[in-house]
Image (cartoon, helix red, strand yellow):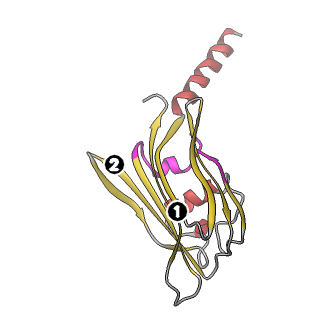
């Protein structure tokens, strides 16, 4: 019995040591008031940081909706770009993107959202419920511990010739680190 308890305690300790943590901070966002209203926010509970959104889309967005994520990693005091692409969600499903980081982020995001990642985006309530990263996240295999900046812009082109309409833009800083560091 003592050996089993000791093994169980060692296993729990190993699991706790391998747990990765994400800390979100410095969120800034803009919503196009003609298209949407709501909030994008960071929440912290028991040292667990979560990123969320509760947004009401008032007009249908179709034609082209270009999502531009920019992910930068802080290395030796300078930010280095890991990801900076334009993704037309009316033509390409982010879950099928050729970029492994986009594909993995999209797959992780589907656990926390109530909407499709592909357009058209119909009027309604769009939720991102407490997005976080835990030790099981495949993103942790692609992104090393450290400090990051993430920016995302969503731009709508109702027709091929129409001028761009910025739907939303946000930036957020985050830190990935092992629970033992």
Residue at the spot 52% in from the left edge and 37% down from the top edge: 20
Q: Decide: marks 1, 2 in contact (CB < 8 A)?
A: no
Seen in the picture, residue 173 relative to 153 is either above or below; the reply is above
Q: Nearer the viewer, mark 1 or mark 2?
A: 2
According to the image, label 2 marks what residue?
Answer: 74
Which of 55/93 is in front? 55
Residue density around tag 1, few if under 14, some if 14–19, many if 20 or more, within 10 Å: many
Q: CA distance from mark 1 to mark 2?
A: 19 Å
Would you place residue 99 above or below residue 127 in this image? below
Does the magenta segment cover residue 89? no
Mark 1 lies on residue:
102
Between 19 and 80, the one lying in front of the other is 80
Counting other residues with Cα less than 10 Å from the Cα at mark 2, is it few (<14), some (14-19), or many (20 or more)? some
State left or right for residue 147 relative to residue 10. Answer: left
| Bounds of the magenta segment | 128-147
Eyeballing the image, is 93 above or below 9? below
Residue 96 spot, x, y in % from top left:
59, 69
Residue 125: image quadrant is bottom right
Report helix, strand or loop for mark 1: helix
Q: Which mark is first along the chain, 2 or 1?
A: 2
């Amino acid at each position: 019995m003592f050996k089993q308890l000791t093994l169980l305690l060692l296993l729990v300790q190993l699991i706790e040591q391998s747990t990765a943590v994400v800390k979100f901070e410095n969120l800034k966002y803009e919503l196009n008031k003609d298209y949407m209203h709501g909030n994008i926010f960071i929440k912290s509970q028991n040292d667990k940081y979560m990123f969320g959104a509760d947004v009401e889309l008032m007009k249908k967005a179709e034609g082209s909706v270009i999502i531009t994520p920019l992910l930068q990693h802080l290395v030796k005091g300078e930010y280095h770009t890991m990801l900076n692409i334009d993704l037309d969600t009316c033509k390409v499903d982010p879950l099928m993107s050729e970029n492994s980081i986009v594909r993995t982020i999209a797959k992780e995001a589907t656990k926390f959202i109530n909407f499709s990642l592909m357009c058209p985006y119909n009027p309604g309530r769009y939720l991102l419920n407490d997005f976080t990263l835990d030790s099981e996240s495949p993103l942790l295999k692609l992104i090393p511990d450290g400090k990051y900046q993430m920016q995302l812009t969503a731009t709508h082109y109702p027709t091929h010739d129409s001028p761009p309409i910025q739907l939303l833009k946000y930036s957020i800083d985050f830190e990935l680190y092992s629970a033992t560091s």
